[in-house]
Image (tube, rainbow, N blue to C red):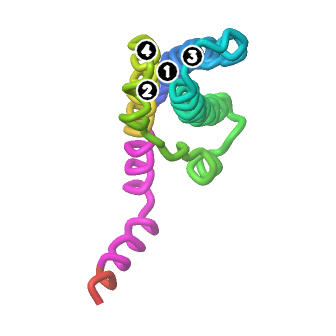
């Protein structure tokens, strides 16, 4: 178990570094102040950039929040119960294909990178919750009872 925790801690640290890098890149790409002052970008592109910028930064912030909760747990600042109750990953809001078509290739690549990062963290979150539910006989029993009464 100690080895699993060490591996998990390293995965969290690696993902955290990646998320910070993507957050910094997103901030630079989606900072519209310089673009707005030039005024040579069509409105539809600026709107698409604004919408996808908000989705992208929200996605990255959800990932960072999840990773910070994991780090706090590993540092002993959160209990396992607190982590499971309050450390859920925010819902993914995928990019809009129509907006994506209006954006530069580099911007699209950044957005896709954040979507892939969110998907990886979502898999970790789901695996962690399944493992914890498997260890908890009460939750297991509640799940079986819920399934038994679901068809009625």
User: Which of the image's four quarters has the C terminus?
Assistant: bottom left
Does the magenta segment cover residue 37?
no
Q: Mark 1 points at which residue?
A: 15
Residue at image x 60%, y 33%? 54
Left or right of 147 in this view: 2: right
Q: Which of marks 1 and 3 is nearer the N terminus?
A: 1
Q: Is mark 1 on a helix, strand or loop?
A: helix
Does the magenta segment cover residue 142?
yes
Q: Is mark 3 on a helix, strand or loop?
A: loop
Q: Which mark is residue 52?
A: none
CA distance for labels 4 and 2: 20 Å
Q: Is residue 51 above or below residue 17?
A: below
Q: Mark 4 points at which residue?
A: 104
Query: Which numbered disc, 4 or 2, marks the residue closer to the eye?
Result: 4
Q: Which mark is residue 117?
A: 2
Give the residues in magenta. 125-147
Residue 89 at x, y percent in the picture: 53, 43
């Amino acid at each position: 178990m100690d080895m699993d925790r060490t591996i998990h801690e390293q995965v969290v640290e690696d993902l955290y570094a990646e998320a910070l890098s993507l957050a910094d890149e997103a901030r630079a790409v989606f900072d519209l102040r310089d673009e707005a002052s030039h005024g040579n970008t069509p409105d539809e592109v600026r709107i698409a950039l604004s919408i996808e910028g908000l989705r992208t930064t929200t996605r990255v912030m959800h990932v960072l929040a999840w990773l910070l909760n994991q780090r706090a747990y590993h540092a002993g600042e959160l209990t396992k119960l607190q982590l499971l109750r309050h450390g859920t990953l925010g819902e993914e809001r995928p990019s809009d294909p129509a907006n994506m078509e209006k954006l530069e290739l580099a911007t699209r690549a950044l957005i896709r990178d954040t979507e892939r990062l969110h998907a990886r963290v979502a898999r970790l979150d789901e695996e962690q919750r399944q493992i914890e539910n498997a260890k908890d006989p009460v939750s297991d029993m509640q799940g079986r009872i819920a399934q038994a009464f679901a068809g009625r």
